[in-house]
Amino acid sequence: MDAPKCIEYAFPGAPKTVAPYPILLTAHAKYEYFEKQQGFAFSSILKNPMMLMMIFSVGLMFVMPMMMDNLDPEDKERMQKQMEMQSDPQKMLSELMGGLTGAPAQAPVKKASGKSRKSRRD
């Protein structure tokens, strides 16, 4: 069997020449299958959204007491009153409803002792 006839045609319009047999092909570049692993960077930890929220929260924990010291006594008293209202939800809702309807705040009702109550069976 004769060797195949190979004609080299480098680009359109180039002269046709006989190519040597066997044809040798060479790669132009080495193919990279994997990306190189990045090194450790402390800034990448700080750019994490979870870390940003944590740093912000810790910062507020240190700044808020300093801000509270600079408040007027009247403002401090008002904030303490609001905090008391938040600790008792029923009291907070009653004041909210009273504020919406324009009704005055009710005085606390005293509970009757158990001895003066009449039983239903009598």
Image (cartoon, rainbow, N blue to C red):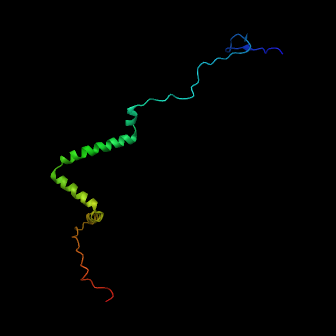
Which residue is the extreme one toward the right?
Answer: 1
The vertical placement of 13 against 105, above or below, is above
Q: Looking at the picture, how far across and down is residue 49, in whole percent?
A: 39, 40
**Quadrant where the image shows the N terminus:** top right
Residue occupying image coordinates x 22% and y 58%? 81
Residue at horizontal 21 percent and vertical 56 percent from the top: 80
Q: Position of residue 64 (x, y in %)?
A: 24, 46
**Above or below, comparing residue 11 to residue 31 in the picture:** above
Q: In this view, does 119 lie above or below 36?
A: below
Q: Which residue lies furthest to the left in this view?
A: 73
At x 26%, y 80%, the residue is 114
76 lies left or right of 45: left
Q: In which quarter of the image is residue 56?
A: top left
Residue 42 shown left or right of residue 61 in the figure: right
Residue 10 sits in which quadrant?
A: top right
For the residue pair 12 and 112, the one nearer the viewer reads as 112
